[in-house]
C-alpha cells in the first residue's frame, strides 16, 4: 500500500543519524596520512579544526536549502528546483548507481576487513562480510524506520563511548611520543586536507531526512550544525589522544594508529577490541547510508512513472520498501564486481564514486546562489550568515576535492585500474542523460 513519509524523527534522532554518517572508518585511517603531511602537531590539529569549520559552512548552506525545500530527497529536490528536472534526475540516477551504493560498498569492505581479524570466513572473508552486512541492514530498514532508528542509537552510543576510551588510552598509555621528522618539510597540506574532508564526509545526508523530521524548517538547522560541532569536538579529542601516545612521528609511521594506541594499554587484546570498535563504526555508517540513500530513489519514483515502483511508501514500518530493495541489490553487484576485479575493494569504490560525488556536491552549493538570485522575495526561516562568503568557501572546498580526486586517481603511480574505475563511474553517470529523455517521454 502506498503512503507518505511520516514526521517521526526528533532533533536528537537527526543529530544521531548525522553523527553516524560522519564518524566512520576515516578516523582510524586518515590521521596517519594527515600527520605525515603536516609539519607540526599544531598544524596537524589545525587541519582537523579547519575540516570542521569548512564542513560547518557546508552545513549552513544545506540548512538554508532545507529551509527552502524541506522535502524527502535532499540534493535531488534542491537540484531539481534550482537547475531543472534533468539535473535532479541525473543526480538521483548517479546516487542510485554510483554515489550512495558505492559508498555503502566501500564502508562494507572496511567492515569485512576488520571483522575478518576477529573471525575469518575463508578465502573471500572480506567480501562475504561486506555482502552480509548490506543484506542484514537492508532487511532491518525494511522492518521500519523506528527499528532502524533504535539500532542506530545503540550502535552510535557504543561507538562514541569507544572513541572516548581510545582518546583516554592515548593519554594514559604511557607511550613515548615521537616528534615529526626534521626533514619531513611539512609534506602536502592540501593533500592532508583531502583526507580530513573525507573523514568529515556524510553530514549532508541529514538533508534527506527533512521530510521525516518534526518541524523541519526550524529543526534542520539544529540537526546539521549540532551534528558537525559534536563530530569536530570528538575528532579533536581523539587526535589529541593519538598525539599524546605516539606523537606526530609515531602517528605518521603507523598503519593502524588506533590499534597501536590500544596496544600500549592492553596489548593484543586491546588491538582486537579496537577492531570491534571499527566494525561498530562501519556498521553504523552503513545503516545510516542505507536509511538515507533509499529516500532519493523514493523521490525519483514519485516524479517519473518509469520508476513509479520506487515511489511506493509502505505504510507498515513507514519505509520506502522497493527503493531499499533496489539499493541493496545494486550495492551487492558492486561488492561482487570489486571483489572480482580489485585487490582492495575500499580503494576501488572510492575511485568509482569520488569524482561523481564531488561534481554534484559542487552543483548543490551553486544551487543556493540560484535561489538567492531568483527567489529574492520569498521569506525563509533561515538564511546563511555572511552571504556570499560562507557559500563561496563551501564551493571552493568542493572544487578542490573534485580536482584532487581526479588528480589522485589518474596519477600514473596508482596504475591504470584507477583510471578505468573513474571512467566506469562517469560512464554510468552519463547513461542517465539518455535515460532522462526516455523517462520524461514516458
Image (cartoon, rainbow, N blue to C red):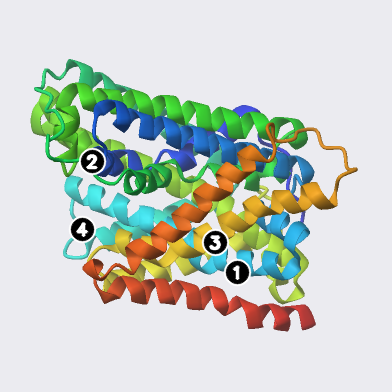
CA distance separating discs 1 and 4: 34 Å
Is 258 drawn above or below residue 363 in the view shown? above
Badge 4 crowding class, 10 Å Cα cut-off, few under 14, some 14 to 19, many 20 or more, is few
Q: Which residue is mark 3?
A: 359
CA distance separating discs 4 and 3: 38 Å
Residue 440 position, x and y percent, is 76, 78
Tag 2 or tag 1, which sits nearer the N-term?
Answer: 2
> Residues at badges 2 and 4 in contact (C-beta under 8 Å)?
no
Evaluate whether residue 162 shows in this view. Answer: no
Q: Which residue is mark 2?
A: 32
Tag 3 or tag 1, which sits nearer the N-term?
Answer: 1
Of tags 1 and 3, the one toward the viewer is: 3
Q: What residue is at 55 percent from the left and 34 percent from the top?
A: 56
Residue 267 position, x and y percent, is 9, 29
| Helix, strand or loop under label 4 | loop
Seen from the viewer's position, the closer of residues 429 and 441 is 429
CA distance separating discs 2 and 4: 29 Å
> Residues at badges 3 and 2 in contact (C-beta under 8 Å)?
no
Of tags 1 and 4, the one toward the viewer is: 1
Tag 4 or tag 2, which sits nearer the N-term?
Answer: 2
Q: Is residue 123 rendered to the left or right of residue 399?
A: left
Rendering quarter of residue 227: top right
> Residues at badges 1 and 2 in contact (C-beta under 8 Å)?
no
Q: Which residue is mark 4?
A: 121
Q: What label sits on residue 93 in the rendered view?
A: 1
Q: What is the quadrant of the N terminus in the image?
A: bottom right
Amino acid at each position: 500500500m502506498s503512503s507518505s513519509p511520516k514526521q517521526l524523527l526528533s532533533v536528537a534522532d537527526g543529530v544521531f543519524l548525522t553523527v553516524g554518517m560522519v564518524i566512520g572508518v576515516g578516523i582510524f585511517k586518515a590521521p596517519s596520512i594527515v600527520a605525515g603531511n603536516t609539519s607540526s602537531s599544531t598544524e596537524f590539529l589545525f587541519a582537523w579544526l579547519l575540516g570542521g569549520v569548512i564542513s560547518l559552512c557546508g552545513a549552513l548552506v544545506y540548512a538554508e536549502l532545507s529551509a527552502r525545500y524541506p522535502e524527502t530527497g535532499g540534493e535531488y529536490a534542491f537540484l531539481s528546483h534550482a537547475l531543472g528536472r534533468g539535473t535532479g534526475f541525473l543526480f538521483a540516477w548517479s546516487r542510485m548507481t554510483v554515489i550512495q551504493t558505492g559508498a555503502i560498498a566501500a564502508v562494507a569492505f572496511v567492515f569485512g576487513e576488520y571483522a575478518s581479524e576477529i573471525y575469518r570466513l575463508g578465502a573471500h572473508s572480506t567480501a562475504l562480510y561486506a555482502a552480509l552486512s548490506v543484506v542484514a541492514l537492508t532487511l532491518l530498514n525494511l522492518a521500519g524506520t523506528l527499528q532502524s532508528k533504535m539500532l542506530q542509537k545503540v550502535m552510535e552510543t557504543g561507538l562514541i563511548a569507544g572513541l572516548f576510551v581510545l582518546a583516554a588510552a592515548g593519554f594514559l598509555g604511557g607511550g613515548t611520543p615521537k616528534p615529526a621528522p626534521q626533514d619531513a618539510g611539512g609534506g602536502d597540506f592540501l593533500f592532508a586536507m583531502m583526507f580530513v574532508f573525507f573523514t568529515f564526509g556524510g553530514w549532508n545526508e541529514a538533508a534527506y531526512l527533512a521530510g521525516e523530521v518534526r518541524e523541519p524548517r526550524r529543526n534542520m538547522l539544529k540537526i546539521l550544525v549540532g551534528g558537525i560541532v559534536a563530530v569536530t569536538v570528538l575528532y579533536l579529542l581523539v587526535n589529541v589522544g593519538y598525539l599524546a601516545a605516539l606523537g606526530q612521528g609515531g602517528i605518521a609511521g603507523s598503519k593502524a594508529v588506533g590499534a597501536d594506541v590500544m596496544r600500549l594499554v592492553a596489548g593484543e587484546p586491546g588491538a582486537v577490541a579496537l577492531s570491534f570498535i571499527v566494525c561498530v563504526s562501519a556498521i553504523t555508517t552503513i545503516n545510516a547510508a542505507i536509511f538515507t540513500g533509499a529516500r532519493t530513489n523514493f523521490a525519483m519514483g514519485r516524479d517519473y512513472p518509469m520508476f513509479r515502483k520506487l515511489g511506493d511508501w509502505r505504510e507498515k514500518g513507514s519505509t520506502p520498501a522497493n527503493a531499499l530493495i533496489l539499493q541493496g541489490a545494486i550495492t551487492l553487484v558492486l561488492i561482487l564486481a570489486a571483489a572480482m576485479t580489485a585487490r582492495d575493494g575500499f580503494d576501488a569504490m572510492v575511485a568509482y564514486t569520488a569524482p561523481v560525488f564531488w561534481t554534484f556536491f559542487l552543483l548543490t552549493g551553486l544551487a543556493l546562489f540560484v535561489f538567492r538570485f531568483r527567489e529574492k522575495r520569498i521569506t525563509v526561516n533561515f538564511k546563511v550568515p555572511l552571504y556570499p562568503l560562507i557559500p563561496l568557501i563551501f564551493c571552493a572546498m568542493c572544487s578542490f576535492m573534485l580536482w584532487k580526486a581526479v588528480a589522485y586517481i589518474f596519477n600514473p603511480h596508482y596504475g591504470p585500474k584507477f583510471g578505468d574505475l573513474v571512467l566506469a563511474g562517469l560512464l554510468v553517470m552519463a547513461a542517465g542523460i539518455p535515460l532522462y529523455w526516455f523517462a520524461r517521454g514516458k
